[in-house]
Image (cartoon, rainbow, N blue to C red):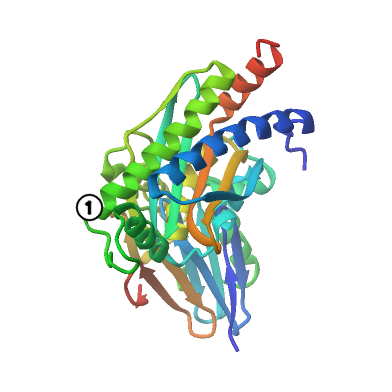
């Protein structure tokens, strides 16, 4: 296989620094919203073939909720927050300060709450990245979809596949306390943006 | 005991093994194409990701495109004894999962995938005997090799014959 490597090890390390800053900020945003101690578990920053994106999250046939934000500005790309259906209901209860089990369906109120989570978490990540790189970018309004986990990721993967066979993917799972899962966060910069960020890092401007 | 073979994004698979079930799980904007020859008892499936390679793809990545992937699947089936006039071909997928919620981007890949798959199958002289395409819902496509039964399932509903 003569597939060109997108990034050297050293360049990947630089992205891990940015990803960690972004995830710290995003984790804090979520923690403040639910008033709990949240951990970013098993963060991944790596070059991934588009076909493997669905397996980063797993549970492909499970009912799930996704909130998508498109990144535009100096950097373009995709942000997706994902929950299996039960975790989405649980998070809505936490946000509304309801006893666990109160929310039983994804009604308008529940959907708005999760969109707001997507908006906050995505914006906080992007702010940290913008501060560090001096590159400006903003998220679109959040779009929410309820479907099979695999289908949501399938659609995202197809979008990524348009830009190449592999891309830089930042992925983590937010957990709380006894490993109660509060969602999966995924950020995929477009390949041109990956180059833009690299050029910025290597120009010594930072 | 049946054995499940999951055909991932840009992958394809052909078998005559009757214990196998071939599946494209969680199709969103992608299109799954299932084909079965009831005489040769040969089954094949491909998971198309994008409509058109623009002639640029090579190696393993080419089967992600409708224009390059479909010939690979059917050539393989013909080589293993399938006959064009006997083939039962069914397609599903190509949903527009995010565009309907107001995101302005090229998530209409689904629609373009369906158009490309239909056009290329027609050019190849293949008739589509069943389809469930478009809309906003994700789907799982299955092909049971021992019977040739082809099914589709959407979220929150039962598996149905396609």
- Residue A66 x/y as whole percent: 39, 51
The reply, left or right, for residue B72 in relation to residue A75 is: right
Q: Residue at x 60, y 89 (%)?
A: B1
- Quadrant (top left, top right, bottom left, bottom right) of the C terminus of chain A: top right
- Residue A155 x/y as whole percent: 44, 49
- The residue that label 1 is drawn on is A109
- Residue A107 x/y as whole percent: 22, 58
Using the image, determine if residue A35 lies above or below residue B132: above
- Quadrant (top left, top right, bottom left, bottom right) of the N terminus of chain A: top right
Label 1 marks which chain's residue?
Answer: A
Which residue is at the far bottom?
B1
Using the image, determine if residue B158 lies above or below residue A172: below
Q: Residue at x 46, y 67 (%)?
A: A61
Q: Residue at x 52, y 44 (%)?
A: A186
Please name whichever residue, B22 or A196, is drawn nearer the observer in this view of the structure.
A196
Q: Is residue B53 visible?
A: no
Please name whichever residue, B48 or A104, is drawn nearer the observer in this view of the structure.
A104
Q: Secondary structure at mark 1?
A: helix
Q: Residue at x 32, y 35 (%)?
A: A141
Please name whichever residue, A122 or B57, is drawn nearer the observer in this view of the structure.
A122
- Residue A75 x/y as whole percent: 50, 23
Total tally of numbered discs in the picture: 1
The reply, left or right, for residue B139 in relation to residue A128 is: left
**Neighbour class for label 1 at 10 Å: few (<14), some, many (≥20)?**
few
State which quadrant residue B31 falls in: bottom left
State which quadrant residue B155 falls in: bottom left
The reply, left or right, for residue B42 in relation to residue A205 is: left
Using the image, determine if residue A42 lies above or below residue A19: below
Using the image, determine if residue A45 lies above or below residue A13: below
Q: Is residue B19 visible?
A: yes
């Amino acid at each position: 296989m003569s597939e060109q490597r997108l990034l050297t090890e050293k360049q990947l390390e630089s992205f891990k620094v940015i990803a960690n800053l972004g995830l710290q900020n995003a984790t804090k945003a979520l923690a403040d919203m639910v008033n709990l101690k949240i951990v970013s578990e098993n963060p991944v920053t790596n070059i991934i073939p588009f076909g493997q994106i669905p397996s980063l999250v797993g549970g492909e046939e499970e009912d799930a909720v996704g909130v998508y934000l498109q990144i535009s500005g100096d950097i373009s790309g995709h942000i997706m927050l994902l929950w299996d259906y039960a975790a989405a209901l649980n998070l809505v209860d936490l946000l509304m300060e309801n006893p666990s089990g109160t929310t039983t369906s994804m009604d308008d109120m529940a959907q708005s709450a999760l969109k707001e989570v997507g908006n906050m978490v995505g914006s906080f990540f992007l702010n940290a990245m913008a501060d560090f790189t001096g590159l400006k970018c903003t998220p679109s309004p959040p779009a929410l979809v309820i479907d099979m986990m695999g289908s949501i990721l399938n659609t995202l993967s197809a979008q990524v596949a348009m830009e190449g066979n592999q891309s830089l993917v930042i992925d983590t799972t937010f957990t709380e306390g006894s490993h109660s899962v509060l969602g999966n966060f995924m950020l995929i910069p477009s390949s041109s943006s990956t180059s833009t960020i690299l050029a910025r890092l290597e120009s010594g401007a930072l | 005991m049946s054995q499940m073979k999951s055909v991932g994004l840009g992958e394809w698979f052909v078998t005559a093994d009757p214990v196998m079930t071939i599946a494209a799980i969680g199709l969103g904007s992608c299109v799954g194409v299932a084909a079965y020859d009831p005489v040769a008892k040969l089954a094949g499936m491909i998971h198309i990701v994008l409509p058109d390679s623009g002639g640029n793809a090579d190696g393993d990545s080419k089967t992600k495109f409708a224009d390059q992937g479909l010939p690979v699947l059917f050539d393989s089936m013909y080589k293993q004894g399938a006959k064009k006039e006997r083939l039962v071909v069914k397609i599903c997928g190509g949903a527009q999962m995010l565009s309907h919620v107001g995101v302005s981007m090229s998530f209409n890949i689904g629609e373009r995938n369906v158009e490309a798959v239909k056009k290329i199958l027609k050019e190849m002289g293949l008739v589509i005997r069943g389809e469930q395409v478009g809309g906003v819902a994700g789907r799982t496509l299955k092909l049971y090799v021992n019977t040739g039964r082809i099914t589709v399932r959407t979220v929150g509903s039962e598996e149905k014959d396609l």
